[in-house]
Structures are given as structure tokens and as C-alpha cells.
Image (tube, helix red, strand yellow):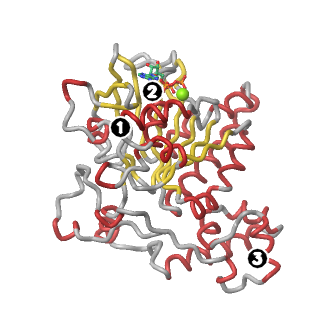
């Protein structure tokens, strides 16, 4: 699936852009949507079981874990793992996925082709080396009112802009677990950015998750949404709230972490296989054992922290918000200042560059 304007490349700054020979590398490949029956060994019976579980394409199959596929087709884990591997191999054959062993240059080329979505603030984009990456999970965590939901709302608008305005001409899927999605806010942000608010609203699909199982079910249908609606950004606001509310007390901690772990890993796989950006939000909780630095830490323990590709900690200081990128594989640990206003996420007035 190709989105208008994708071929032009982003206009964001990027600290990867230091080699001219690689600047001409193609931008990200469109997602491959071959039906599952195109795989050797998938006959009508298996196809129907897979389709009934919402696994329609080879890409859907590659995005699932063997245990999910085993549940879907009623097989043992080994057979399911073989089918998943077969799907992955097909995508490698089609050059949509890389081989098991590739040179660092090849990985560098692939990383150059990664698309980015502007957050709405140049400062925050610069902190993230050009914006929110596709094929990755970016976690925003911070205390209540720090701006996590505002970031999600702004991204829903920005992803729909053409590339020269910081978007991907794609749509957004908003998984709302806290009932905080507000279409009025989207209209306000779109209008103050000079965009057609009715068209922007139409480009956002909202899924309200009523509990953690429902949240997992919705994620299972992501493949169909990407295929049918051109989703380029999935937001989960918040990833952890239901798990926290449902699994109370120490006795249930390991079950909670297991389920959350599975949810987060599915998100990571989906981001990569469907070539979309995934953003999750997470609250912080008081951590009295932290004697140094900020005495708060993200909920969800190590699970969310270790699974997210990038983590951004947001805190309030007066009218400003400060974002700090934490534990990134390649971003320096530094901070950026942004504000929340009628445009959603924006730069402080005295630091504003020519406006998007
Ligand atoms: P929680 O953890 O409770 O979900 P959050 O981090 O998601 O919190 P947000 O809802 O994103 O917090 O931020 C709320 C803040 O956003 C408000 O306190 C206000 O400062 C700001 N805000 C909301 N709407 C507007 C607006 N229209 N104009 C300016 N600022 C706004
Ligand atoms: Mg919120």
C-alpha cells in the first residue's frame, strides 16, 4: 500500500543523514499483502482456520507468535512455529524482511528508509532524531497531566499530513483504555494547524478497550486495519492501565507481567511487520527507594521499559514540559522543552522556527 507523498522523503532533521550515497536509498517498502493460501502447505482447511482467527495474509501470520497461531488452528506449538517460520521466509524471499544474517551496511540502508512522524514540536522531533519512528515502539511516560494524551492527539493529526509537513499521509488507530480520546481536541488541533478538521477526524479510528483481554483482542485485529484503512500509526493510551486495575496485589504480579509482556512483544512485532509507528503511554508511580534523581518510575516495571524501543520521560515545569529520552540504543540522553497549547504539542514561543 503506497501513501501519497511517500516517495519524496522526510524533511525532518536526522542524525543518520551523514552519508550522501545512502541518502538515495529507497524509502520504506509498502507492506506485502499476500493471502495465506499462497504459502506452500496452506490448504483450504488451514486457510479457513487462520482466516477465522483474523489471519488473512502472510504478513498477519508473520506478526503472530507461534502460541497465538497454535491457538488459532488447534495445533501443537511446533507445527505453529513451522508455519510462522514459513511466513517469515516468504517475506524474506520477497525482500520485505531481511535475512537472518545481514551486513551492518544493509541494516544502515534499511534504517535510512524508516519513516518518521513529527510530534508537532521541532524541539521534541530533534530529541527523537527527526520524529516518531515507524517499525518501533515509542513509550511516553510521566505523571498525570504531563501531556501524554496530548502528544497522542497531536500525533493523530500529524501522521495525516503529507511528508513535507512532517506526516506520512497515513491514518491513525487510537486504542483508548482510559476514555480520554476527545474528537473536539482533534478538531481544535487540526484547525489551528490550518488543516481540514473533518478529513482529519475521518482519518482516526478509535477502539475503546474495556479490559485487558479486549485490549489484546483489538491488537489482534490490527492487521486488518492496516490493510483496509492505511494505518501508519497506532497509539495505546495507556498500555498499562487495565493490567494495573485488574491484577491487584502481589499474588497476581507475575500473571500481570506475563500478560503485559505478551502484549508489548506483539506490539513490537506488529510495528516492524506492518511498518507502522507505535506509541504507548505509561504513568509513573512513586518509587520511595529512589534516593537520587526523580523519585518516580514508570509503571509496568521492567516489562514495558525493556520492550519499548524508545522511552521518553515527560515532566511538568511551570507552563513548559520537559522531555528526556531514556535508555535509547542510539539517542544521546538529553532533554527538550515543549509546550501544550491550541496546536497540541508545540515549541515554546521564543524558540519557534517557521511554523508547519
Ligand atoms: P494522565 O496520566 O492523567 O492520563 P496525561 O499525561 O495524559 O495525564 P494530558 O491529558 O495529556 O495528561 O495533559 C493534560 C494537560 O494538557 C492539561 O493539564 C493542560 O495543561 C493541557 N491541555 C489540555 N487541553 C489543552 C488545550 N486545549 N490547550 C492547552 N493546554 C491543554
Ligand atoms: Mg492521559
Q: Is residue 239 left or right of residue 145?
A: right
- Give the residue displayed 53% in from the left and 62% down from the top: 274
Quarter assignment of residue 40: bottom right
Does dot 2 land on a helix, a strand or a loop? loop
Q: Nearer the viewer, mark 2 or mark 1?
A: 1
Per the rendering, the mark at residue 193 is 1
Tell me residue 244's x, y (percent): 67, 29
- Whichever of labels 3 and 1 marks the residue nearer the N terminus, that label is 3
Does dot 3 land on a helix, a strand or a loop? helix
Tell me residue 13's x, y (percent): 23, 49
Q: Residue furthest bottom?
A: 40
Q: Is residue 23 left or right of residue 252?
A: left
Does dot 1 land on a helix, a strand or a loop? loop
- Whichever of labels 2 and 3 marks the residue nearer the N terminus, that label is 3
Tell me residue 145's x, y (percent): 48, 20
Q: Nearer the viewer, mark 3 or mark 1?
A: 1
Residue 71 to residue 283: above or below: below
- Give the residue displayed 45% in from the left and 26% down from the top: 147
Tell me residue 65's x, y (percent): 66, 61
- Give the residue displayed 45% in from the left and 78% down from the top: 95
Position of the C terminus by quadrant: top left
Query: Would the CB of label 2 be found within 8 Å of ligand 1?
Result: yes
Q: Which residue is mark 3?
A: 47
Residue 314 to residue 90: above or below: above
Between the C-alphas of marks 2 and 3, the distance is 44 Å
Per the rendering, the mark at residue 36 is none
Quarter assignment of residue 47: bottom right
Query: Would the CB of label 3 be found within 8 Å of ligand 2?
Result: no
Q: Which residue is mark 2?
A: 147
Amino acid at each position: 500500500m503506497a501513501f501519497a507523498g511517500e516517495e519524496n522523503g522526510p524533511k525532518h532533521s536526522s542524525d543518520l543523514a551523514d552519508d550522501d550515497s545512502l541518502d538515495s536509498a529507497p524509502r520504506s517498502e509498502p507492506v506485502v499483502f499476500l493471502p495465506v493460501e499462497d504459502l506452500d502447505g496452506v490448504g483450504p482447511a488451514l486457510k479457513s482456520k487462520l482466516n477465522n482467527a483474523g489471519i488473512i495474509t502472510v504478513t498477519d501470520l508473520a506478526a503472530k507468535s507461534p502460541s497465538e497461531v497454535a491457538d488459532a488452528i488447534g495445533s501443537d506449538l511446533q507445527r505453529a512455529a513451522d508455519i510462522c517460520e514459513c511466513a517469515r521466509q516468504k517475506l524474506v524471499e520477497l525482500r520485505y524482511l531481511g535475512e537472518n544474517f545481514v551486513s551492518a551496511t544493509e541494516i544502515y540502508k534499511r534504517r535510512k528508509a524508516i519513516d518518521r512522524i513529527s510530534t508537532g514540536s521541532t524541539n521534541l522531533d530533534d530529541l527523537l532524531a527527526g520524529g516518531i519512528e515507524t517499525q518501533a515502539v515509542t513509550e511516553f511516560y510521566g505523571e498525570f497531566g504531563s501531556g501524554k494524551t496530548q502528544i497522542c492527539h497531536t500525533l493523530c493529526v500529524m501522521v495525516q499530513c503529507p511528508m513535507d509537513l512532517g506526516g506520512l499521509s497515513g491514518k491513525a488507530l487510537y486504542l483508548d483504555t482510559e476514555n480520554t480520546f476527545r474528537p473536539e481536541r482533534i478538531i481544535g488541533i487540526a484547525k489551528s494547524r490550518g488543516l481540514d478538521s473533518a478529513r482529519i477526524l475521518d482519518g482516526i479510528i478509535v477502539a475503546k478497550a474495556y479490559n485487558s483481554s479486549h485490549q489484546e483482542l483489538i491488537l489482534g485485529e490490527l492487521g486488518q486495519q492496516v490493510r483496509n484503512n492505511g494505518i501508519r500509526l497506532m497509539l495505546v493510551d495507556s498500555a498499562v492501565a487495565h493490567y494495573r486495575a485488574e491484577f491487584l496485589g502481589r499474588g497476581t504480579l507475575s500473571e500481570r507481567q506475563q500478560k503485559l509482556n505478551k502484549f508489548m512483544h506483539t506490539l513490537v512485532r506488529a510495528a516492524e511487520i506492518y511498518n507502522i509507528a507505535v506509541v504507548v503511554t505509561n504513568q509513573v508511580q512513586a518509587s520511595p527507594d529512589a534516593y537520587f534523581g526523580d523519585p518516580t518510575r514508570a509503571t509496568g516495571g521492567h516489562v514495558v521499559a525493556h520492550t519499548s524501543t524508545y522511552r521518553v520521560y515527560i515532566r511538568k515545569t511551570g507552563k513548559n514540559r520537559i522531555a528526556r529520552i531514556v535508555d535509547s540504543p542510539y539517542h544521546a540522553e538529553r532533554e527538550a522543552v515543549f509546550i501544550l497549547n491550541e496546536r497540541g504539542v508545540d515549541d515554546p514561543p521564543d524558540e519557534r522556527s517557521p511554523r508547519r
